[in-house]
Image (cartoon, rainbow, N blue to C red):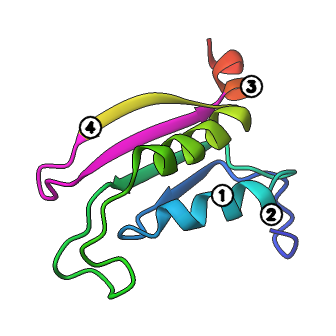
Amino acid sequence: MNKLGHKEVSLLKLDAEGFEWEILPTILESLSQVLPNQILLEAHYCAHMHAKPSWWRREMRAGEIALVSTSLFDSGYRVVSVEVNVGCPSCMNFGLMRVHCLERCL
């Protein structure tokens, strides 16, 4: 961003095959001053057989999902779209947008 002179991130696409639950809190903490305006997220709640060993055969607990969801909400994100991922029976696709972007667009 610095090299190219960008001041904001318009869109972040996150497809981390189950590791999004670990990555999202890190993004929210480390980029707190320059959070993306929008996040497209494939959220897994149950691991696939082909997943990495540390995530394999693990289901997310409701509390774990709630903590990340609360962090996203507290950082100004709101869900603007939800789509069932027909190719992955244990994940959903979400579109999130920060409130200040929603207010600008409405």
The residue pinned by badge 1 equals: 25
Span shown in magenta: 84-98
Mark 4 is surrounded, within 10 Å at the Cα level, by few (under 14), some (14 to 19) or many (20 or more) other residues, namely few
Distance, label 1 to label 4, CA atoms, is 22 Å
Distance, label 2 to label 1, CA atoms, is 9 Å
Q: Is residue 89 magenta?
A: yes
Query: Quadrant location of the C terminus?
Result: top right
Distance, label 3 to label 1, CA atoms, is 20 Å
Counting residues from the start of the chain, the first of labels 3 and 4 encountered is: 4
Q: In x, y percent, where is residue 94?
A: 40, 41
Q: Return the residue found at the far top.
A: 106
Residue at image location 33% in from the left, 33% down from the top: 82
Amino acid type, residue under disc 3 in the picture: His
Q: Is residue 74 magenta?
A: no
Amino acid type, residue under disc 2 in the picture: Ser
Residue at image location 44% in from the left, 51% down from the top: 41
Distance, label 4 to label 2, CA atoms, is 28 Å
Counting residues from the start of the chain, the first of labels 4 and 2 encountered is: 2
Q: In x, y percent, where is residue 15?
A: 41, 64
Secondary structure, mark 1, is helix
The residue pinned by badge 4 equals: 83
Secondary structure, mark 3, is helix
Distance, label 3 to label 4, CA atoms, is 23 Å
- Observer-side mark, 3 or 1, equals 1
- Observer-side mark, 1 or 4, equals 1
Placement of 8 over or under 74, stated as above or below: below
Q: Which mark is residue 100?
A: 3
